[in-house]
Image (tube, grey):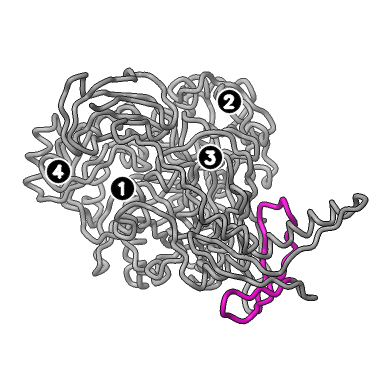
Amino acid sequence: MFKKILIANRGEIACRVIKTARKMGIKTVAVYSDADRHALHVKSADEAVNIGPAPSAQSYLAMDKIIAAAKATGAEAIHPGYGFLSEKAAFSAACAENGIAFIGPPPKAIDAMGDKITSKKLAKEAGVSTVPGHMGLIADAEEAVMIAREIGYPVMIKASAGGGGKGMRIAWNDAEAKEGFALSRSEAKSSFGDDRIFIEKFVTEPRHIEIQLLGDQHGTVLYLNERECSIQRRNQKVIEEAPSPFLDEATRKAMGEQAVALAKAVGYFSAGTVEFIVDGKRNFYFLEMNTRLQVEHPVTELITGIDLVEQMIRVAAGEKLSIAQGDVKREGWAIESRLYAEDPYRNFLPSIGRLTRYRPPPEGQRVDGTILRNDTGVYEGGEIAIHYDPMIAKLCAWGPSRAEAVSAMAQALDEFEVEGIGHNLPFLSAVMGQERFQKGALTTAYIAEEFKDGFKGVAPDAAALADLARVAAFIHVASETRAAQITGTLPNHTRQIGEAWVVTIAGTSVSAVARPVSAGLAVALEGGAAETVSSDWKPGQKLGSFRFARKSLSVKISRHDGGFRLRRRGMDVIAKVQSPRVAELAKHMPVKAAKDTSKLLLCPMPGVIRALSVQVGDKVEAGQAVAIVEAMKMENVLRAEKSATVKRIAATVGESLGVDQLILEFA
């Protein structure tokens, strides 16, 4: 077994590999760019080596620097994680040439499966069901349109060397095919250094289901059940689960056996994943093979009990797998929520900045028998930079059943505290609460269908609003009681706390009576019976657990304009608790008008201007592309919202802009 390995990656996956290596008694070496000097994976490893500037092309993609770091530190093997060099056959070969074990598949398999065009041809030869499409290279946008017409719309335009949703576009007509080809090609070249593009039929009502494989160097290949990854945004997975709520045993077995046949056909070993699109009748079609560890591997580990990273290391060291196909378990249900540094209220645009608060719920088994796991690469006080993927953490919940896993995840999201940047926690919570998700009625169009007008948060119903109103009354009375205790220590100072209040929440006002009782605070809302609320919450705490007669709520709390901001289950409301007289006077306060920005194109995220397609004096129409902003490895097209004339251009191509910084002004 190896004594020391180097992890050629960063963030949560580097920390994940370090965790297993430590369990196995193996020393670890981290590599880091200048931007990651203080990153968690650097702090966690036994040694760390700087490999260059922030741009990944000069650091995490620099094979010579990583090989040199391994040699300098005496690392016997390199684990590539996912992304970066993990699917580069040249890197696997370079490791071998330098006497370093590559903890992954052989170069031949990476070459065969890493290229989407070649992999589809090989899959077809191996008897794997494939999606109709054009597997040849496409020269330009005009040829892309011609091929798309032949296949029939809708089509998926994809980068041959792609992954992680990069270089992918769906086209429903000629115009979208032409634009999608150009964008996919540009994004592919930027992300992978390879701008080859192919086109295939887009399967409607599709589910994205993948088979986890594990093979050794002695000819054994196993399938470790499946994962459902249908909840996607911009072709990037957001929520995954294992097993799939859709597959039956016959389909699971057929998909697994085809995946194994493909792996054996190319001499595959180590961990890998074969991805399929499955239609509503459980017909499945090969999409691609990922010749690496997948982001969502924890859910497979939770239902099988198999540490995939450990098995990868053992396979790379030449060991045989210690289990057979019949030994693979499928116990309970696991769900993974990807926590991203992106603002769901602004169309999921990337967010950067300092994590002023980062408090995940405790990992491990809970009192109800469910299990939480959180794979992360950040810490409170750390920075989320613009240079890399926006993932903050992967929160996983396991339960004996799917319903229990969903419930555990919803509760864990309520308890997860993140402040300082935009993040998608509210969105994840909203999905967990949707009836459609709870029924397992998933497709890759789920987000587009369920959030047609974008994410606006969850509007509380009457019962939820009443619960939050009672919580607001509790925290207000607790705050007033604390203030009275402080002033009561001064000579001649006494404060009486009233029982009659008006709770204004989400724009609605309701009278309330709040009386202290032995178990907590009895709160009666206008026209209703009193309900006792109890909690250990203290003023200043950002998270509170509030117990009612038949339930408990975890609520995130912060001060806001003389009141409180309350957040749970995707709901985000402002509550003010005032005396009846103050509430009456507050009705006469003027409302501040919002600033008019209708004639301004503002940068919606921190990023770099990659293209400006207009000049001063140009007339633009609604929907016309006017600029492209790149942020966190994704290119975002900005379009005019209405017909107008360009009056002034305030930004230049190549310039880095912050959120809401002016790009151009319309007349």
The image shows residue 219 at horizontal and vertical percentages of 43, 51
Q: Residues within 10 Å of mark 1 (few under 14, many from 20)?
A: many
**Residues rendered magenta in the picture:** 521-549
**Pointer 3 residue:** 421
Label 4 amino acid?
His
Q: Is residue 576 above or below residue 57?
A: below
**Pointer 2 residue:** 70
In terms of secondary structure, where does tag 1 sit? strand
Q: Disc 1 and disc 2: Cα gap in Å? A: 31 Å
User: Could you say which is closer to the camera, residue 630 or residue 212?
Assistant: 630
Label 1 amino acid?
Glu
Q: Sequence order check: which comes first, mark 1 or mark 2? A: 2
Relative placement, left or right, of 184 versus 242 is: left
Q: Is residue 40 above or below residue 206?
A: above
Q: Sequence order check: which comes first, mark 2 or mark 3? A: 2
The image shows residue 428 at horizontal and vertical percentages of 47, 56
**Pointer 4 residue:** 134
Q: Disc 1 and disc 3: Cα gap in Å? A: 34 Å
Q: Disc 1 and disc 4: Cα gap in Å? A: 14 Å
**Pointer 1 residue:** 288
Q: Disc 4 and disc 2: Cα gap in Å? A: 41 Å
Determine if residue 69 is in view: yes
